[in-house]
Amino acid sequence: MAKVFSNIITAIDIGTTKICVLIARKLSDDQVEVLGVGRSPSYGLSKGVVVDIAKTVSSIKQAVDEAQLMAECEVESTYIGISGAHIKSFNSSGAVPIKRSAVTQEDIDTALAAAKAVPIEKGQKVLHVLPQYFMVDGQDRIENPIGLHGVRLEVVVHVITGSVASIQNLVKCCETIGLKVQDIVLEQLASADGVLSLDERQLGVGVLDMVAERQTLLFIKMVQFDLQRLSLLQVITLRTILLLGLEQILQMPSELNMNQAMLGLMMNGCRVKALRW
């Protein structure tokens, strides 16, 4: 008989070459106990997008079954990661009057909602609204405005969107095997949140996400997520990144040297952390 745990968290990384599932129990706000891990080859996806529902469902089910067997429990809901060429991002801003002379969480939520309420491309859906900084009566670059007195609160955010069709297809695959999707997270953002220390975020760091069919570079500094520096975030290949860093034209071998990649990016003024190699 399967065990019943409270505070169970399940995450599924649905990639082009493999599906990874993690089942964990939340012990505190910053600690979890890993109960089970599952992995299976991925069939039915191309460049992070579902192209065959039946094959994708079968791949996800195989990985979930393996994780549940190890954890000795059954799961009913999950968080899923998303990526692919359909991911887009842009900067936005919003401003609201401060209701009670000092900034409250309600004011921040209202400002974020105003920044989010902008036209987006047809067929796209907002995945994340990431605050970059706040302003109170023109005072710039405030990270946490709660408690500050003023009349007007402004926020600058970075909005990340994804294809509605791609999102719906991933959700459908999970629901087909009986899993309710709790939330959808940009994979590169989740990776950065999981591996970067506070010092690295304050200094500024580039996270290089390297998987089978794409390589993505994400720049992070403090609480600012500057994706806009790469307008074609998801389609810039590692070869292109290396050429930008080394500033020379050359024929890259089929097996790329990670040291060259790191050197090239550091020459270009970025500290880089490599993930998912």
Image (spheres, helix red, strand yellow):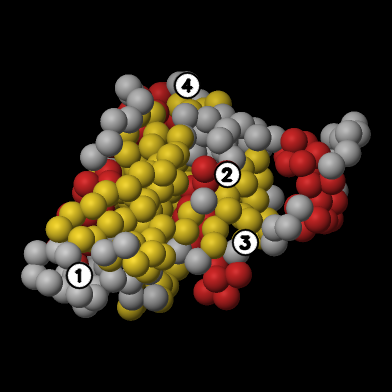
Which numbered tag is attached to residue 150?
1
Using the image as rendered, state which of residue 246 and residue 97 is in the foreground: 97
Earlier sequence position, callout 2 versus callout 3: 3
Which numbered tag is attached to residue 229?
2
160 over 139 or under it: above or below: above
Q: Is residue 221 left or right of residue 137?
A: right
Instruction: Identify the residue at horizontal 24%, vertical 75% (top origin).
Output: 148
Q: Residues within 10 Å of mark 3 (few under 14, many from 20)?
A: many
Q: In x, y percent, where is residue 207?
A: 62, 55
Residue depth check, mark 2 versus mark 1: number of the one nearer the observer: 1
**Dot 3 corresponds to which residue?**
205
Q: Is residue 219 left or right of residue 264?
A: left
Q: Could you tell me the amino acid type at mark 4? A: Val
Earlier sequence position, callout 2 versus callout 1: 1
Q: Are marks 4 and 3 in contact (CB under 8 Å)?
A: no
Using the image as rendered, state which of residue 177 and residue 155 is in the foreground: 155
Q: Which structural element holds mark 1? A: loop
Q: In x, y percent, where is residue 226?
A: 52, 51
Using the image as rendered, state which of residue 32 and residue 192 is in the foreground: 192
Q: CA distance from mark 2 to mark 3?
A: 13 Å
**Dot 4 corresponds to which residue?**
51
Earlier sequence position, callout 4 versus callout 1: 4
Q: Could you tell me the amino acid type at mark 1? A: Gly
